[in-house]
Amino acid sequence: MMTLFAYETNAMVSATQSRLRAEASFKKVQAKKEADSEVLSGLAADARAVDEKTAKLRALRLARDAAAEAEQAPEPKSQGKRGGRV
């Protein structure tokens, strides 16, 4: 038969162990959250870099196309003696 003192001692040890397990679990969750936030910030930075590069390439492409179109623009037809009426 267990004495009252032994029961209280076992209860205190059990409570201490439970608290230590809970603290360890909490620390593990916190560490995972920190690691996840670092990964997400890295992904966000990568996405911003891709967006900036895409915008730069789009501007270059539009400038190239505009220059090519200006080169290929047909010269206006000269109008004859009639003033352009047909």
Image (cartoon, rainbow, N blue to C red):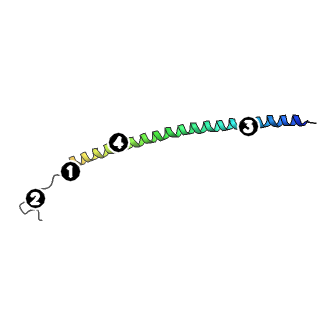
How far apart are labels 1 and 2 at the CA level?
18 Å
- Tell me the crowding category of disc 4: few under 14, some 14 to 19, or many 20 or more residues within 10 angstroms, Cα based: few
Pair 2/3: label in front: 3
Image-based side of 59 in relation to 5, left or right: left
How far across and how far down the image is residue 27, in percent?
Answer: 65, 36
Amino acid on which the number 3 mark rests in the picture: Arg
Q: Are marks 4 and 2 in contact (CB under 8 Å)?
A: no
Instruction: Identify which amino acid the numbered label 1 is placed on.
Output: Ala
How far separated are the C-alphas under marks 1 and 4?
26 Å
The N terminus: image quadrant: top right
Q: Marks 3 and 1, Cα distance to the nearest angstrom? A: 80 Å
Camera-nearest residue between 43 and 70: 43
Q: Quadrant of residue 57?
A: top left
Q: Return the residue at label 4.
A: 56
Q: Secondary structure at mark 4?
A: helix
- The structure residue drawn at horizontal position 22% and vertical position 48%, both measured from the top left corner, is 70
Q: Is residue 79 above or below residue 70?
A: below
Q: Earlier in the sequence, mark 1 or mark 4?
A: 4
Residue 73's tag is 1
Q: Earlier in the sequence, mark 2 or mark 3?
A: 3
- Residues packed near mark 3 inside 10 Å, few (<14), some (14 to 19) or many (20 plus): few
**Lower sequence index among marks 1 and 2:** 1
Q: Is residue 37 left or right of residue 61?
A: right
* Residue under the image location 61 percent in, 36 percent down: 31
Asked if residue 7 lies left or right of residue 16, the reply is: right
**What residue is shown with label 3?**
19
**Front of the two marks 1 and 4:** 4
Q: Nearer the viewer, mark 4 or mark 2?
A: 4
| Residue at 71% from the left image edge and 38% from the top image edge | 22
Q: Assign a secondary structure to mark 2.
A: loop
Residue kind at label 4, given as amino acid type: Lys
